[in-house]
Amino acid sequence: MKFLVLGSVNIDETYRVEHIVKEGETISCKGLSRSAGGKGANQAAALAKAGADVSLACKIGNDGLWILDILSSYGADVSRAVVSERAGTGKAIIQVDERGENSIIIVSGGNGLLTGADIDDMLSGYGEGDVIVLQNEVNKLAAIMSAALGKGMKIALNPSPFDDSLLSLPIEKVRYLILNEVEACSIMGEEKISDDVEYRAAITALHRKFPDTVIVLTAGADGAMCFYDNQVYYSAGYSVEVADTTGAGDTFLGYFLHSMESGLGVVKALDKANKAASLAVSRRGAMESIPFMDELLL
């Protein structure tokens, strides 16, 4: 069994601010840094650091080759990356406030320029039982899902960032749906999830809508729930001092998927994913904040 992350690569520009800028407001930046990011790259890094056999398929510009070098150093295969002479690498403009919360603006770059030929090449060699990991930062998601299903691959979908186009996708055919409360509300047409009772109601409603899908609903520091095998499982989060929440969800996803596909079971998978995510938020940055598996054992 192999993992293929077909997703975005971004150059993250992170601005340290006192608070997230408001409409019409101008504020000073307390620090600026550049790092490797993008949900596809982050999730590939998380899977690689967790010990999975994972490849990243993506489209970038020459300005992003250094990100492939980083991923390769983590153990991810990057041979399916397409380097375009026409497009630049995607970019994320990130504000991080003093509490570690963030807001992000995405410039798609090569992430939005995938072609049918790119998809065929990227999925070549994959088949029954392999897992393809998708987000919503690349174009042609419907075509990618159709091609993957045609090969018998299992789809893990992280519907982030959410927009209404996701509602037209065959989510009922997805094996793993991993999402937060905002994305769950968007899919279900609800306004807010605010307590344990509402979380359980939401994940149960999602199960009724997608009965053949393993559904994971994350709640940040409060942990995560999973509807699996007709039962709701809950795993509490770990209490840490938050430095930066960027990439926490991607870390969780990588560790959860690797644990599940390695046969650890849902309880251990949730706990391991929560622990990895807690370590990630205690550090600054996105990809570089993701822990290696051996760090979870310390």
Image (spheres, grey):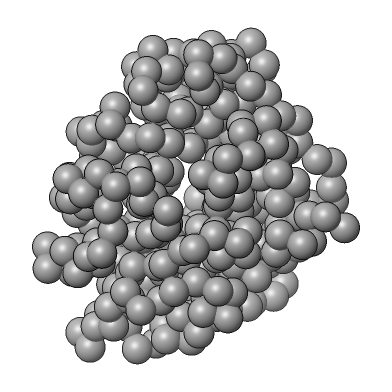
| Residue 83 image-quadrant placement | bottom left
Q: Position of residue 246 (x, y in %)?
A: 61, 57
Residue at (55%, 30%) from the top-left corner?
217
Compared to 66, does 71 lie above or below? above
Image location of residue 179, percent across then percent down: 49, 36
Q: Residue 200: horizontal and vertical position, in percent?
A: 58, 14
**Residue 139 seen in this snapshot:** yes
273 above or below 186? below
From this view, report whether residue 37 is shown above or below residue 4.
Answer: below
Seen as rendered, the residue at the extreme right is 298
Determine whether, in the image, residue 102 is placed left or right of residue 116.
right
Residue 97 visible, this angle: no
In front here: 42 or 198? 42
- The quadrant holding residue 167 is top left
Image spot of residue 103 (x, y percent): 55, 53
Q: Residue at x 83, y 55 (%)?
A: 297
Q: 47 or 250, which lies in front? A: 47
Figure quadrant of the C terminus: bottom right
- Residue at the location (69% across, 75% down)? 31
Q: Residue shown at 46%/58% (left/top)? A: 39
Depth check: 213 or 99 in front? 213
Pick whichever, 275 or 258, lies toward us.
Answer: 258
In the rendered picture of this protein, how many numbered marks are placed on residues? 0
Dividing the picture into quadrants, the one containing residue 40 is bottom left
